[in-house]
Image (cartoon, rainbow, N blue to C red):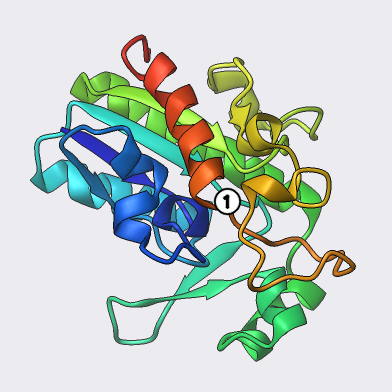
Amino acid sequence: MILFDGCSWTYGDELDNPERDRFSTLIGEDHVNLGKNGKSNDGILRTTLDYCESNHVDIAVIQFTKFSRTEIRKSNSDEYDFLSIGNVLKGGETKELSKIYYEHIHNKNLHVANYHKNKFLLEYYFKTKGIKYYFININNEDINVPKSSWYNMIDKKPVTSMVSLIGNRFDNPENYCQGRYKKEDKRSGGHPNKRGHSIIADHISLNIRKAS
């Protein structure tokens, strides 16, 4: 069984039928998809470990998201709030919490170190459990970024960028859903359409069986 975890790109946001047309389904294997809109790398780590501790997993395909995202556990609850720059710009439900975090706490070194930590913990966990794994990212954020103490412990192989596979939404609109964003809108966003998901699925299928 293959486990997929990630953010809206793994969930299949903006597709007319995400469960049918997203790349995890197109790969054509028995699988579970834990992707969720707005999820941070902290959340991806948490839900991946939770699932693997209670279920048999042969291969894990992990899609890392924007490094700047994080999550905060709600008071007296097992639920989490997702914090992101997108929630500040677009008025998401955690706009005020996100605004406080990005104005007073967040910095680049912090979120890069957090990414290295999440990557190391997943690598170590999968190797300990004997689970094959393949990592992919939205873009090239893990290349040429500040290093951290965690960086010395991770596998140095660069993580493949989805944008490198399907191009960006301005130059390659044929691979993106067009319902939510206009071409002149320069904010980050836009999700792969069926064609984009098919390209991503082909790439993962070629690499998944030789996952480390």
Identify residue for label 1.
192
Q: Is disc 1 surrounded by few (<14), some (14 to 19) or many (20+) residues within 10 Å? A: many
Residue at the image point whose x is 44% and y is 57% from the top: 12
User: SS at mark 1?
Assistant: loop
Q: Quadrant of residue 87?
A: bottom right
Q: Quadrant of residue 211?
A: top left
Q: Is residue 105 visible?
A: yes
What is the x, y in percent for residue 207?
A: 42, 16
Side (left or right) of 16 relative to 174:
left
Observer-nearest of 30 and 57? 30
What is the x, y in percent for residue 134?
A: 41, 25
Observer-nearest of 166 and 121? 166
Residue 181 to residue 121: above or below: below
Side (left or right) of 122 relative to 25:
right
Farthest residue, direction top:
210
What is the x, y in percent for residue 65?
A: 57, 49
Q: Is residue 100 visible?
A: no
Observer-nearest of 83 and 32? 32
Give the number of callouts: 1
Residue at the image point whose x is 65% and y is 36% from the top: 166
Please, what is the three-letter code of the amino acid marked with disc 1?
A: Pro
Residue 206 to residue 47: above or below: above
What is the x, y in percent for residue 58?
A: 18, 26
Residue at the image point whose x is 59% and y is 26% from the top: 159
Side (left or right) of 51 relative to 48:
left
Q: Considering the image in quadrants, where does the N terminus appear?
A: top left
Q: Considering the image in quadrants, where does the C terminus appear?
A: top left
Residue at the image point whose x is 40% and y is 42% from the top: 23
